[in-house]
């Protein structure tokens, strides 16, 4: 399968720390690739480095084009959507304004967004800062889905959500993944197993494993790569 | 009672000028994190461009029309100068805050020195419409008409800025950028265009303050921008960095405080403003980080 995103020897230094130490992996076109690892190993930084939100060295190619020297807004306009870890909704803006801000090229897919998250239509005039965590997550995902993208970078979409909402968000992502490639950072292995076809595991700023989601069924491997807390989640 | 009314209107007039300077300053800091010490230079450039234009527009016989045309020239000069400052000096230094401070402080000093070198240190006066020098009777006191001009101009700018921020695409980008600039770029928006626009808007508003200061103080001087900038910074901190409405309220409070205290305590008005700033910071230290356009 052709690679949509190719990352080679990616390095990031932040605040004196060498956070990414030569990360290399591919994201194949179609489906969901999960980026896994313990807390603080560089998963979020990898997504931010792809978008140019942090200073980085190395090679990043998207659809065959080198993007590592481009500013963030140009990278995004090539067709990359981003759902950040902490949602980062604009609290002072209404739900409608949060979505309007994400519009580009006159191709906004409000029908899709409101079909996936009907609640956002009902709360269009409400300030995003007054929404619950789950509703804010819907806004963050909806912003990324509003435009047709070739690749979605989604960072911990189920973090802090109630179990019922985790299932809703996972269902929405599953529908999204039918038409768009997703690079997903996620701690919940149940969600990963449900959505992902490929996995990449980071440890201390390096890729330590690449494989398929079936690898998560190996409790010994999961324990070694992700720690004892995840071992029980292996099937 | 009549003295109190006069002090109130005069204080609001002074606050109006603070607001015209502070509004741009606040937006620039809120959106870009730039402490623009050159903002007073925008005021000086606008004021002197208007004065220069007025002195050359002798072909226009109507004093009022000449003043309006000269003022528009001043506003345009302030906006263009501010836009160039952003593009040439500030843009290459984003996220390098120390260098930004050094460059903007240097530009502020250089602008004052340049104006002094060309036109000298003496104050310069505009020919203004006769109505400006007249008074309006209110509650038994004679209010100088130019105070109404200052207050009206500030209210127009406040309304215009609020409408711009509320109803335009760029306004939406600026409001979002004040909250989280990185996330705005992550939505595919070139936030640098908004940066330039905010500088231009701030430059025009500061230039308007420069022109109106020539009416309020009856003359302009090379150092007027610097002296008003100090109080504008205080207004921005009290009103909340990035908040236009906060700046408007704080401008009125600072202007009124200066006038009342100056009159009732023989010249301690400036000290009262500094004490007010200290009180606000002690009671609400988060105001230094408060951001809502």
Image (spheres, rainbow, N blue to C red):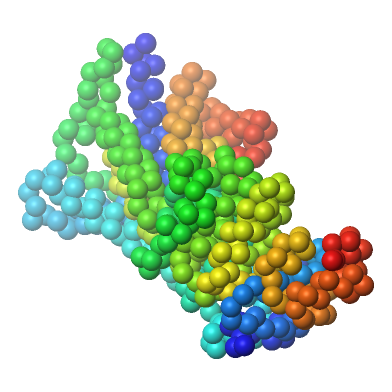
Residue shown at the point (46%, 69%) measured from the top left: A148
B150 left or right, relative to A65: left
Nearest to the observer: residue B198 or residue B111: B198
Image vertical order of residue B141 relative to residue A169, above or below: above
| Screen quadrant of the N terminus of chain B | top left
At which x and y percent is residue A85?
67, 59
At which x and y percent is residue B265?
52, 20
To which quarter of the image does residue A21 belong? Answer: bottom right
Image vertical order of residue B163 relative to residue A192, above or below: above
Nearest to the observer: residue A209 or residue B272: A209
Residue shown at the point (69%, 75%) measured from the top left: A197
B60 left or right, relative to B123: left
**Furthest residue to the front?**
A235
Image vertical order of residue B179 relative to residue A12, above or below: above
At which x and y percent is residue B121?
38, 53
Nearest to the observer: residue B186 or residue B209: B186
Residue shown at the point (39%, 60%) measured from the top left: B197
Residue shown at the point (71%, 77%) measured from the top left: A198
Residue B25 in view in this figure: no
- The number of callouts visible is 0
Nearest to the observer: residue A184 or residue A221: A221
Image vertical order of residue B223 relative to residue B17, above or below: below
Residue A145 in view in this figure: yes
At which x and y percent is residue A160?
72, 50
């Amino acid at each position: 399968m052709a690679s949509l995103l190719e990352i080679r020897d990616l390095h990031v230094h932040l605040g004196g720390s060498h956070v990414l130490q030569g990360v290399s992996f591919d994201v194949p076109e179609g489906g969901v690739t999960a980026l896994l690892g313990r807390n603080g190993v560089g998963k979020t930084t990898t997504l931010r480095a792809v978008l140019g939100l942090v200073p980085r060295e190395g090679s990043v190619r998207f659809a065959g084009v080198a993007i590592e020297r481009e500013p963030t807004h140009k990278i995004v306009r090539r067709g990359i959507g981003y759902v950040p870890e902490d949602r980062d909704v604009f609290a002072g803006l209404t739900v409608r304004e949060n979505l309007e801000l994400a519009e580009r090229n006159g191709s906004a897919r409000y029908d899709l967004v409101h079909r996936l998250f009907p609640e956002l239509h009902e709360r269009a005039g409400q300030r995003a800062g007054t929404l619950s965590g789950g509703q804010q997550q819907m806004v963050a995902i909806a912003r990324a889905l509003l435009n047709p993208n070739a690749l979605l970078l989604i960072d911990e979409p189920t973090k802090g959500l109630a179990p019922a909402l985790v299932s809703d968000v996972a269902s929405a992502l599953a529908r999204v993944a039918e038409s768009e490639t997703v690079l997903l950072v996620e701690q919940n292995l149940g969600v990963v197993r449900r959505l992902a076809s490929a996995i990449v595991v980071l440890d201390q700023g390096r890729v330590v494993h690449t494989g398929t989601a079936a690898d998560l069924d190996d409790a010994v491997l999961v324990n070694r790569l992700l720690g004892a807390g995840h071992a029980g989640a292996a099937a | 009672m009549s003295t109190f009314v006069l002090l109130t209107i005069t204080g609001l007039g002074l606050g109006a000028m603070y607001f015209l300077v502070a509004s741009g300053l606040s937006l620039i800091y809120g959106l870009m994190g730039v402490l623009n010490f050159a903002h007073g230079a925008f005021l000086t450039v606008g004021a002197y461009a208007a004065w220069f234009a007025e002195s050359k527009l002798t072909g226009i016989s109507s004093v009022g029309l000449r003043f309006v045309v000269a003022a528009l020239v001043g506003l345009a000069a302030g906006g263009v100068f501010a836009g160039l400052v952003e593009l040439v000096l500030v843009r290459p230094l984003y996220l390098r805050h120390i260098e930004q401070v050094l460059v903007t402080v240097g530009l502020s000093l250089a602008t004052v020195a340049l104006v002094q070198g060309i036109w000298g240190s003496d104050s310069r006066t505009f020919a203004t419409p006769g109505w400006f020098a007249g008074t309006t009777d209110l509650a038994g006191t004679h209010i100088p008409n130019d105070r109404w001009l200052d207050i009206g101009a500030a209210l127009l700018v406040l309304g215009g800025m609020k409408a711009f921020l509320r109803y335009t695409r760029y306004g939406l980008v600026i409001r979002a950028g004040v909250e989280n600039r990185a996330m705005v770029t992550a939505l595919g928006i070139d936030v640098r265009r908004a940066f330039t626009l905010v500088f231009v808007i701030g430059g025009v508003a500061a230039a308007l303050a420069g022109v109106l200061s020539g009416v309020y103080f009856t003359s302009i001087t090379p150092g007027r921008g610097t002296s008003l900038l100090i109080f504008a910074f205080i207004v921005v901190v009290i009103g909340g960095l990035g908040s236009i409405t906060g700046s408007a309220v704080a401008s009125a409070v600072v202007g009124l405080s200066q006038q009342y205290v100056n009159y009732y305590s023989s010249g301690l008005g400036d000290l009262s403003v500094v004490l007010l700033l200290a009180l606000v910071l002690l009671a609400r230290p988060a105001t230094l980080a408060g951001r809502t356009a």
